[in-house]
Amino acid sequence: MNAPDTHRQEAEAATRPMRMALKLHPFYRGKIQTAPRCPVRSLSDFAYWYTPGVAASCRAIAENPDEVFRHTSRWNTIAVVSDGSRVLGLGNIGPQAALPVMEGKALIFKYLGGVDAVPLVISEKDPSRMIELVLAIQPSFGGINLEDIAQPKCFTILDQLRARAAIPVWHDDQQGTATVILAGLTNAMRIVGKELPEVRIVFLGSGASNTAAARLIFARGADPGRCVVVDSKGILGTHRRDIYEKRKSYAIKWHLCRRTNREGKRGGLGAALEGADVLIACSRPGPGIVRPEWIRRMADGAIVFACANPVPEIWPWEAREAGAAVVATGRSDFPNQVNNSLGFPGIFRGALDVRSRSITDTMCFAAADALADYARDRGLQSDRILPTMEDWEVFVEEAAAVGTQACREGLARIPHSADELRASARQIIGCARRMTGTLMDEGIIPPPPPED
């Protein structure tokens, strides 16, 4: 089979998930549901689970609020909160259209992390009111996952909630994506034999994902001055008057203008990629956003992360043919998925199991190292720089690493050893997977309809 035929088949396969989603979502009428945690042997059991017996638990919590984590499912429950203002690559589609994504997030939380997640889409765009809303719902949850919120307000919302909330608040589009990018980059650098302080990295996109990725990568040793950020109007730098004039609203973006691009480069992505070692693209869906001829101008051993969803900025086969040594995307149907789904289930598992007060950058580093080490221990290859979601034990290792780091930082309310955290995570995640399997085996979750 010649190359055009192969590429045509690959492109057709790439569109299959979207075609099937339109069929499967209405068939199942959603992806999650509430299931009991306790037995109901007969209706008399409700005397314990509800009135009159439940009053004893209520009094215990009133006397000691921390008892809520022992008497209710709050210890393992988080909210996935979004206003639908920046959903995947679809933009500001609103809270109702965002709900399928939040349900999918909750499904992944449960199946891969054993975490009970409640989708909570809200018709509120004002950052201050969103902050107050999340603070008001804290008593029901052990953590908050912010999702698909547009910039610049996503930065303000996260910073304010991390400062004010008594439970961990995490913005997956920032911290989650950045953690997995760092893990993948760590192993990609091992494959091509380069060191982080010496490489030139081009970040395409200056939204939540890439600004957080840059922050973590710089903190891990990359030289910001050797790196370049490119947005829709070109290379960032102190020459960008449009950003300078809005520097109060876009403080992080102006900070990147001042910190990166020591050489004072100007122009677009093509100019930025001349001689670059790494491209980390978290911009708008492609294909065609990144051109093969630009990849050809990169340094030998080039690394290309094209992370836009649902379609990467450049098809992976195009990047490889243009000379990239390691290529990753944000999709599960291509090798090297750089996707936050490899991070957030295990990270929240570890944070919840020690009842952490926050999720810090150093906890993200611990998770990234766990991801990178797991893949390295099983043999690095150019098409396997990260574990896949099939490697469910990696979430156990992430949970142990994150929980242990929280203990080191004094953030854990109930400290545990790494071995204790591994055992707990393995049991909880295993139960979630077995429960799903049992529901399928019993026909409670029916098999999908045949494809057309």
Image: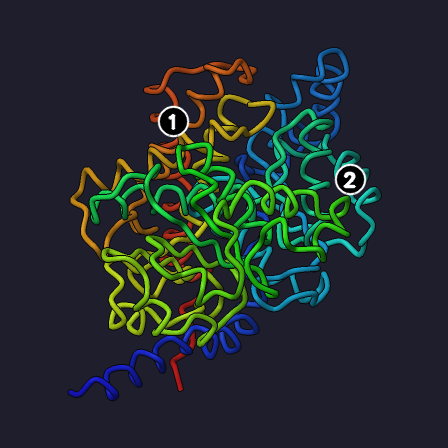
Q: Is residue 136 visible?
A: yes
| Residue 45 visible at all | no
The residue under label 2 is 131
Secondary structure under badge 1?
A: helix
Q: The N terminus lies in which quarter of the figure?
A: bottom left
**Which residue is located at x 76 percent, y 47 percent?**
249
Amino acid type at circle 2 is: Ile
The residue to which callout 1 is attached is 401
The secondary element bearing badge 2 is classed as helix
Which residue does the image show at 21% across and 84% down from the upper left?
A: 3
Give left or right: position of 173 versus 240.
Answer: left
- Percent across and percent down for residue 287 are 44, 75
10 Å crowding of disc 2: few (<14), some (14-19), many (20+): some
Name of the residue lying farthest toward the front: 263
Q: Nearer the viewer, residue 256 or 349?
A: 256
Relative to residue 78, is residue 292 drawn left or right? Answer: left
**Residue 223 in the image: x percent, y percent?**
42, 38
Going by the numbered disc 1, the residue's amino acid type is: Ala
